[in-house]
Amino acid sequence: MTKKKANSEEVVEQEEVSTESIDEVIEEQEEPKVITKEEVIEQLQNEIKQLKNDMLKQHADLENTKKRLEKERIIERKYAAFNFAKHILTPLDNFDLALSHIVESEETKTLKDGMLMIKKQLDKVLEEEGVSEVGHVEDDYDPNFHQAIMTEKVEGVEANKVVAVLQKGYVFKDRLIRPAMVKISE
């Protein structure tokens, strides 16, 4: 016999076996169970309950998502100017530094007065937008708002008091933009 003929005989034998086994399984099965109307109704009611439950869960998820997105949108609006405030601080520090280096004389008095007016206007605008300074001399040291660079023993000053502000710190609304670099008492 050739290989092809042998393979085809094996396939026929397998088909006969599987046909016989199907017939055996069918014979072994009991009579099909008859489902009553009450059972069908009960199954359908259970399915309705499950679908209602799934629908309510999805509705609750949707409502939670809406609330979360609204809250995020409010926060985004509240802190929209945060990056602007953060970037304006360095030029503001440089402006203060330039003001402190103007030599007092009759010729520079009007220049200094004009620069002080501009500085006051800048401070007012920043304050109106929610930017405020943190870290003033004699404040209690607060690691949330101050970065202690140095300590110094100062007579007549209790421990953990700010004795010098090396760089101003700023807060935008209720978020820290940058901590004040301070020297504190020991």
Image (cartoon, helix red, strand yellow):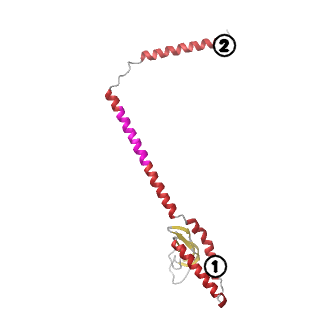
**149 inside magenta stretch:** no
| In the rendered image, the vertical position of residue 40 relative to residue 32, given as above or below | below
In front here: 19 or 41? 41
User: Of the numbered discs in the image, which one, if any, rests on residue 4?
Assistant: 2
Q: Dots 1 and 2: beta carbons under 8 Å?
A: no
Residue 124 x/y as whole percent: 53, 76
Q: Looking at the image, tell me whether mark 1 or mark 2 is earlier in sequence order.
A: 2
Q: In the shown orientation, is residue 4 left or right of residue 63? A: right
Query: Position of 64 compared to 96: left or right?
Result: left
- Residue 154: tell me if it is visible: yes
Q: Is residue 60 left or right of residue 109?
A: left
Counting from the top left corner in percent of width and height, residue 96 is at 61, 78
What residue is rendered at 54% in x and 74% in y?
Answer: 125
* Image quadrant containing the C terminus: bottom right
Q: Is residue 54 magenta?
A: yes
Q: Using the rendered image of the protein, determine whether residue 152 is visible from the camera's viewpoint.
A: no
Tell me the element at label 2.
Answer: helix
Residue type of the residue flagged with mark 2: Lys
For label 1, the residue is 97
Q: Residue 118, located in which quarter of the rendered image?
A: bottom right
